[in-house]
Amino acid sequence: MIGLVVVSHSRRLAEGVAELAGQMAPSVAIVPTGGDGSGGLGTDYVAVGEAIARADSGAGVVVLFDLGSAKMVADMAAEEAEGSVLVVDAPLVEGAVAAAVRAQGGAGLAEVGAAASDAGAVWAGPPPAAGVEESGSVRGEVVLTNSVGLHARPAALVARALDPLDASVVVRFGEQSADGKSVLALMGLGAPGGARVEVVATGADAAEAVRRVEELAARRFDE
């Protein structure tokens, strides 16, 4: 499984981002590193290298950073690392969350890196016009039976459940729509507990996609 390293000028910021992403991807190694090594703000080349080594299970590591000089340090540490390391320029929080969820689903290094870099352009907008959807789509109406609705962890569960399927999935709430495989887009819907959402899926695994969302709702998204 791909590991993640969060590099920040602030140790507490790095730890907070890693904690948040880890809540949605409990099996992924997410290693924070921040500060100049002496308790101040900055980055530490040696610490970043050690973090990469700790995060690498053999599958590779994606490194995220906050500010420009952190990228320089991350690039230097990545060049010296023994395994495959990809340094990604992405929104730190959104990128870490998106990358962690993709890594949890078993995606490869390039896919996890792409999830992070694409996090700044999450699709969540109005539904397609009538007639745009493919014929043969499978639909389901799902009641969000948990207390918080499509908040962070429930959204991550949905995205992880749908990710391996051969299906395009749209989740609708009111006038908004979201890619069902994007944790950030799902969170952007703002669908609260008790709300009804529509799930529309197309593709070979369309029926299974709708069934998985219905199953998660039936068990209250494991709350």
Image (cartoon, rainbow, N blue to C red):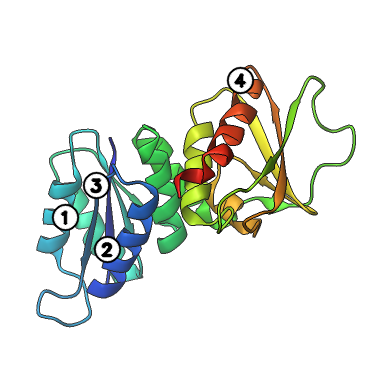
Pick the residue in front: 14 or 43.
Answer: 14
CB contact under 8 Å: marks 4 and 3: no
| Distance (Cα) linking label 2 and label 3 | 14 Å
Residue drawn 71% across the image and 46% down it: 197
CB contact under 8 Å: marks 2 and 3: no
Residue drawn 33% across the image and 57% down it: 64
Instruction: Give the mark nearest the N terminus, 1 or 2.
Output: 2
Q: Residue furthest right?
A: 130
Instruction: Give the mark nearest the N terminus, 4 or 3.
Output: 3
The amino acid type, in three-letter code, at marker 2 is Val
CB contact under 8 Å: marks 1 and 2: yes
Q: For mark 2, give the secondary structure.
A: strand
The quadrant where residue 208 appears:
top right
Instruction: Give the mark nearest the N terminus, 4 or 2.
Output: 2
According to the picture, the residue beneath numbered tag 1 turns out to be: 51
Please tell me the numbered disc located at residue 7. Answer: 2
Please tell me the numbered disc located at residue 88. Answer: none
| Distance (Cα) linking label 1 and label 3 | 10 Å
- The label nearer to you, 4 versus 2, is 4
Q: Does 103 sit above or below residue 67?
A: above
According to the picture, the residue beneath numbered tag 4 turns out to be: 205
Pick the residue in front: 4 or 150.
Answer: 150
